[in-house]
Image: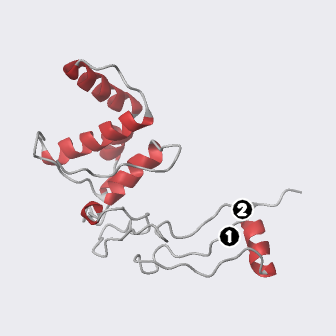
Amino acid sequence: MEESIEEEIERRTSDGQSVQARTSCNCKSTCSRKRVEDGARARGCPCKGANKHCNSSCKCGKRSKPCQNKQIENVCCGKRNCESTKARFGKLCLDVEVLSLGIRSSADIRNDRHDSSARAFRKAGYRNYILDKHGYLGKGRRRVAPSCIVWQIRHHYPTRTGIYMGFREN
């Protein structure tokens, strides 16, 4: 009989093996959980030891998402009904066909090769969101996407390493 991950974590917790103390970070208690290691999936605060900060002014109810690396990236969409859950966001920023058209279009304008990597899809998703919300963006006119939007796009188009570039100012 196979043991589920939850049962294994519960067993290890009750045996007192491999369980670290509750973690805490600048997120207050929003992402503090027990960390269980040695074969089980490590769970807990993604901010622990990573010098990350949470945005305490989040209003969209998505504050349980992992924090961003830079303070400038800690932006909330500010809406009770978070934008990352809307159908329009899914179509514009997560749909493979819409994003691949955007990638091909920008490759055509710049005379570049067509790139179909997850990185290109993330970049196209961020760009579509920013264009939809703020209009024209050019040199010197950069905007930060809300944290909930960024994590939703990263969830759909992840890196193998789990390391992301983040927002770069000019």
Please give the name of the residue rendered at 24% of the width and 65% of the height, measured from the top-left corner: 78
Q: Which residue does the numbered mark 2 point to in the structure image?
A: 40
Q: Considering the image in quadrants, where does the N terminus appear?
A: bottom right
Of 166 and 76, nearer the camera is 166
Residue 58 screen position, x and y as percent: 30, 71
Quadrant of res 147: bottom left
Residue type pointed to by label 1: Val
Drawn side of residue 49 relative to residue 87, left or right: right
Drawn side of residue 80 relative to residue 160, left or right: left
Quadrant of res 119: top left
Q: Which residue does the numbered mark 1 point to in the structure image?
A: 36
Answer few, some or many: residues within 10 Å of disc 1's Cα (few below 14, many 20 plus, some between 14 and 19).
many
Q: Are marks 2 and 1 in contact (CB under 8 Å)?
A: yes
Residue type pointed to by label 2: Ala
- Tell me the distance, in whole angstroms, between the alpha carbons under discs 2 and 1: 6 Å
Element at label 1: loop
Residue 29 screen position, x and y as percent: 46, 80
